[in-house]
Image (cartoon, helix red, strand yellow):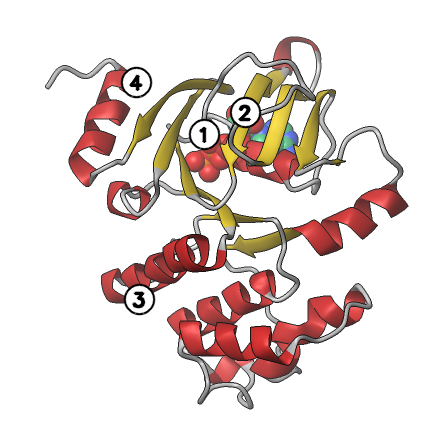
Amino acid sequence: MTTDTATAGAAHAAPLALRSRGLTKTYGSGQAAVTAVDHVDLDVDAGVLTAVMGPSGSGKTTLVHLLAGLDRPDAGQVWVGDDELTGISDAALARIRGRVVGFVFQGFNLLQTMSAADNIVLPLRLNQLPRDEAWYATLIDMLGIGKELERRPYELSGGQQQRVAIARALITRPRVVLADEPTGNLDTHASAQILSHLRASCRELGQSVVMVTHDPTAASYASKVLLFADGKVAGHIDNPTPESVLAGLDALAGVER
Ligand SMILES: Nc1ncnc2c1ncn2[C@@H]1O[C@H](COP(=O)(O)OP(=O)(O)OP(=O)(O)O)[C@@H](O)[C@H]1O
């Protein structure tokens, strides 16, 4: 992810999964106003895993909700590929969002009355998209959930549920998957598995993933870490390691090492 100042709509050498210009969101008004996202320009490369890190309250969740079209900005624009998510009707937004954006949010509810398999294909039904059996089989195989398909979510472990949620996010082949703390409640082993799957879906399947995390180890699975502070992009780290991420966060907080 870069913060270049290329004009919106200009040709780019590398394909972009996601783009924003002047993205701004303020909560409240008057003295109580908080600008959670403050004129953010982003270019997210296609086919890579990007992590977003920063202090609590810096605006990360607000940012991914705006990028996903789950929330409306006060100003600015968002594009997923060539589709603009801003400045369109709710109906048009829902139509685009259902087809081009996938979500993996912490505690994102799987429907308990449905089997894992039915949960996974639900976005296809909701968006009247055809089922691609080969793609379904690829996802089940990559995520290792072949034995879990007929079980209900409450019969699955947290890690298994999260893998089902990832399959559901990927089933429509969305251009972008946005994930908010996708490993927040998982143990180290389950986290490593989920992150490997997300990274593999980028490397092997050309998926683009933007993931908010507080965990430097989780962030080190990404190709790029975006550092976010006070609603703004404060820098980024290429090819991150847990150490370089910690150093970046310390620098952000003004901590000497
Ligand atoms: N619905 C809301 N109403 C009012 N203020 C909000 C709302 N949602 C978020 N905020 C405020 O906006 C700022 C950014 O919040 P946000 O949740 O985006 O931060 P974050 O970086 O994701 O935080 P954390 O890492 O703690 O989850 C915070 O000051 C928060 O209090």
Q: Residue furthest left?
A: 257
Could you classify mark 4 by the number of other residues whose Cα lies within 10 Å: few (under 14), some (14-19), or many (20 or more)? some
Q: Are marks 4 and 1 in contact (CB under 8 Å)?
A: no
For the N terminus, the quadrant is: top left
Q: Of the residues shown, which amino acid type is indicated by label 2?
A: Leu
**First of labels 3, 1 by sequence position:** 1
Q: CA distance from mark 2 to mark 3?
A: 30 Å
* Residue at 79% over, 63% down: 127
Q: From the top left corner, tell me how far across and down residue 40 is, in percent.
A: 57, 19
The quarter of the rendering in which ligand 1 is drawn is: top right
Q: Nearer the viewer, mark 2 or mark 3?
A: 2
Which residue is denoted by mark 1 in the rendering? 1
Which residue is denoted by mark 4 in the rendering? 252
Q: From the top left corner, tell me how far across and down residue 96 is, in percent.
A: 78, 48
Which residue is denoted by mark 2 in the rendering? 42
Name the element at disc 1.
loop
Q: Are marks 1 and 2 in contact (CB under 8 Å)?
A: yes
Q: CA distance from mark 3 to mark 4?
A: 29 Å
Q: CA distance from mark 4 to mark 1?
A: 18 Å
Q: Quadrant of residue 9?
A: top right
Q: CA distance from mark 1 to mark 2?
A: 7 Å
Q: Of the residues shown, which amino acid type is indicated by label 1?
A: Met
Q: From the top left corner, tell me how far across and down residue 166 is, in percent.
A: 51, 64
For the C terminus, the quadrant is: top left
Viewed as shown, does residue 3 lie left or right of 24?
A: left
In this rendered view, identify the residue nearer to me: 69 or 176. Answer: 176
Q: Nearer the viewer, mark 4 or mark 2?
A: 2
- Image mark count: 4
Which residue is denoted by mark 3 in the rendering? 190
**First of labels 1, 2 by sequence position:** 1
Image height check: is 218 above or below 187?
Answer: above
